[in-house]
Image: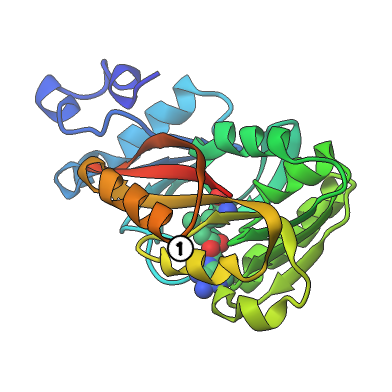
């Protein structure tokens, strides 16, 4: 249900028109973008949301774009007093604090798709692992040796907790992906890389820790018109593109794409 339809009888039509169409729900926390022009209405909006959606206990207003290496936004708390929640996705459970570690539920389909593709017995590396939305379902569904790496201490600590919550084991490393070539002496059959915005260079680094015949699931942010050129670059670097898809909008005209490469 859209934010506008939830607020039909609370705001006049000229103000409804200024609302963003959607909002994100992580566990029992709703995250909304309220433009400054609707400052005076922010609490009305939050309350209406929690009345209409009984599953929502906290409403946060996103104050800025996701920035910094931890990829966490700043929030204003409009309703409720917790920023930690339990989120369910792909048959797994995730505990996280949305103000301390990046999480978006928009990628749940991709995470399920990758977990399906993984083969039993593989050595798998998940870079930029966050609180574990790729890693946990893979290990829950497949008997693999799996390693997760993230440079956000809080994300790694929630990831360790999420291993326990889902009764699985994995090797978790708090570290910078820029050091991946020193960190890993063994090669991997499969590397999952939801790379941060504008950091495609990590793909070149991953090439040297991939076993022969291995594959990479590489996530990148691009505008539609950049894709043909990017495909050409990948092929020039020796990658075979087994599959690619548009995983949805992240900003005006910018989309997240996945490339399955071998
Ligand atoms: C876009 S988030 C993806 C998180 C998670 N995989 C997901 O899909 O929700 C990027 C993650 O990469 C981590 N990160 C950013 N730069 C990094 C780096 N240089 N080395 C290791 N982790 C990094 C951030 O802490 C964040 O958790």
Position of residue 153 relative to residue 251, above or below, is: below
In this rendering, would 98 be left or right of 9? right
The spot of residue 137 in percent (x, y) is 74, 41
In which quadrant of the rendered view does residue 19 lie?
Answer: top left
7 displayed left or right of 253: right
Q: Mark 1 near ligand 1 (CB under 8 Å)? A: yes
Can I make out residue 81 in this image? no
Left or right relative to 20: residue 193: right
Q: Residue furthest left?
A: 14
Question: Which residue corresponds to the image point at 63% horizontal and 58% vertical from the top-left?
Answer: 129
Instruction: Name which residue lies at 58% across and 73% down.
Output: 177
Say which of 165 and 231 sits in front.
231
Dot 1, crowdedness within 10 Å: few (<14), some or many (≥20)? some
Q: Quadrant of the N terminus?
A: top left
Q: Secondary structure at mark 1?
A: loop
Residue 87 in sight in this render: yes
What colour scheme has been applied to the protein in the rendered image? rainbow
* Whether residue 257 is situated above or below residue 174 in the rendered picture: above
Q: Say above or below: 258 vs 236.
A: above
Q: Residue at x 47, y 29 (%)?
A: 50
Residue occupied by mark 1: 71
Quadrant of the rendered image containing residue 68? bottom left
The quarter of the picture showing ligand 1: bottom right
Please tell me which residue lies in front, 40 or 100: 100
Residue 169 point in image, percent of width and height? 88, 55
- Number of disc labels: 1
Front-lying residue, 19 or 227: 227
**Residue nearest the viewer, comparing 43 with 105:** 105
32 is higher (above) or lower (below) than 113: below
- x%, y% of residue 243? 50, 36
Residue occupying the point 74% across, 67% down: 187
């Amino acid at each position: 249900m859209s934010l506008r339809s939830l607020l039909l009888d609370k705001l006049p039509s000229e103000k409804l028109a200024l609302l963003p169409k959607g909002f994100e729900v992580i566990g029992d926390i709703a995250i909304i973008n309220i433009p400054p022009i609707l400052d005076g209405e922010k609490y009305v909006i939050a309350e209406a949301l929690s009345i209409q959606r009984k599953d929502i206990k906290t409403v946060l207003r996103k104050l800025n774009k996701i920035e910094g290496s931890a990829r966490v936004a700043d929030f204003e708390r409009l309703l409720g007093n917790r920023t930690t929640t339990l989120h369910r996705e792909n048959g797994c459970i995730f505990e996280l604090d949305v103000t301390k570690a990046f999480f978006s539920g928009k990628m749940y389909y991709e995470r399920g798709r990758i977990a399906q593709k993984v083969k039993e017995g593989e050595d798998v590396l998940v870079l930029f692992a966050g609180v574990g939305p790729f890693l946990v379902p893979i290990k829950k569904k497949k008997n693999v040796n799996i390693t997760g790496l993230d440079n956000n201490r809080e994300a790694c600590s929630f990831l360790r907790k999420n291993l326990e919550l889902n009764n699985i084991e994995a090797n978790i490393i708090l570290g910078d992906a820029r050091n991946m070539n020193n960190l890993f002496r063994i090669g991997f059959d499969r590397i999952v890389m939801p790379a941060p915005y504008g950091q495609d260079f990590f793909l070149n680094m991953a090439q040297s820790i991939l076993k022969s015949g291995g594959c990479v699931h590489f996530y990148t942010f691009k505008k539609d018109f950049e894709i043909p050129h990017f495909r050409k670059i990948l092929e020039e670097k020796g990658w075979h593109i087994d599959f690619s898809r548009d995983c949805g909008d992240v900003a005006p005209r910018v989309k997240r794409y996945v490339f399955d490469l071998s």
